[in-house]
Image (cartoon, rainbow, N blue to C red):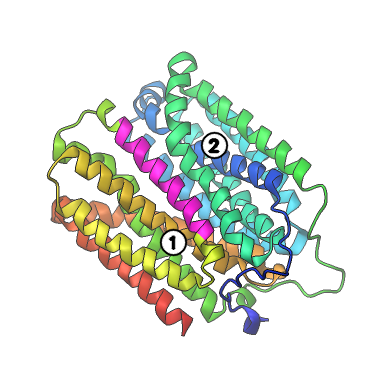
Amino acid sequence: MSSVLTAAPATPASATEPVPRMPWALLAAACLGMFAASSSGTTRAPFLIAMAGDLGTSLPLIANLMALTSIAWGAASLCAGAGSDRWGRRPFLVGGPVALALCMAGVSTAESYLGAALWATLAGACAGAFTGVLMAEASARTVDRQRGRALGWVMAGQSLTLLVGVPLAAAIGSLVGWRGVNLCVAALALLAALGLFLTTLRPVDGPRAAGRPAPRLSAALSPRVLNLLAMGVAERICYGLTAVYFATFLQSTYGLGLGQVALPLALFALGNIVGTVLGGQLADRLGNRMRTFAIAMAGSAVVALALFGWTPALEASVALGFAYVLVNAIARPSLMAALANVPDEVRGTVLGLNVTSASFGWLGAASLGGWMMAEFGFAGFGPLAAGVALFGAALAVFGRR
């Protein structure tokens, strides 16, 4: 089986070959599911101080809830991806958001840090149980030359969390507090579960046939797939370095207050959405996804050097931040579409591994960024991001060969 896991380049549409209709209802439900999963952790950001005071603990411990969520998310995604290849994707697509809703309700009732940490960790595991499977389902319901766009729209749900979810959570939280916001996210997850239930009534996969051997993890780990996963880690580190530290960079460089970084962060999130959607179009229309990925990563390396090395004015830094995340986001749909171009019986495993490896990328970005800021300040971020981006581009170039 591993000999066919080659993740071939996209094939341009033929003028005489009809292109199937995109499953827009499913993609909308999947985007909502991704939005709910991402909101389960990200919307906690405006309430860290309030949560610390309410739960009688320190701010650093509350902030560390994100690390617990990320670790559980990555571990669960690996198991859920393999499980969806054995028993079908629908139980994870519907059951995952329902379980997430229950965990978010649990977070809202926590009376101690230990209780909040337990429920937040379980929520991360529930999110991981269906986000990779969402990608597999969207891939299974589209042909290869549609997958860049389809996966681009699904991934846009994560970016919408930064653009819409966090500001909306802050506004709602001013009325109902952080506990009420968690209940709102729970309701959102239930709505996503309903949408996924209705849009997957006609299955395109099913439980493993009787007598058929179970898919093996080793069958999904071809050298080509491993190379793609390494490219994904590099891309996530590049994105995470800026997503995690962009606000701090602006505050340190220009002396901005917390409220003054809201608009730059919204523009940053908008750049990510535009880049993801544009990247999906390019992944399907240009044909050579590895080349698209390599060019986008090389372009982000150039912009990273300018972003952190040239700070003439706030407006210039915000514009460069928008440009950086846009160019970086163009790379991801090509990578995801290439990862999805594997046999259906191991697609869930491969895309679950992608979510797991992405969590390592996020952790790498946080740790590398913290070390760089302590040793060299933000002046070192440009060379660091550029070096990782060029490494990812090199993996794409040599992976083609």
Q: Is residue 259 visible?
A: yes
Q: Nearer the viewer, residue 259 or 350?
A: 259
Report the disc number at residue 119: 2
Q: What's the amino acid at mark 1?
A: Ala
**Is residue 61 in view from this perspective?**
no
- Residue closer to the observer: 67 or 390: 390
Q: Is residue 276 magenta?
A: yes
Q: Which residues are magenta?
A: 262-281
Image label count: 2
Left or right: 277 as drawn, with respect to 295: right
Number of other residues with Cα within 10 Å of mark 2, as a class: few under 14, some 14 to 19, many 20 or more: many
Separation of residues labelled 2 and 1 (CA atoms) = 34 Å
Q: Amino acid at mark 2?
A: Trp
Q: Secondary structure at mark 2?
A: helix
Kind of element beneath mark 1: helix
| Residue 2, position as x, y percentages in the image | 63, 81
Q: Tell whether position 390 is magenta.
A: no
Up the image or down, 372 lies above or below 15; here it is above
Disc number placed over residue 331 in the picture, else none: 1
Tell me which corner region of the image, top left, top right, bottom left or bottom right, holds residue 267.
top left
Answer with mark 2 or mark 1, whichever residue precedes in sequence.
2
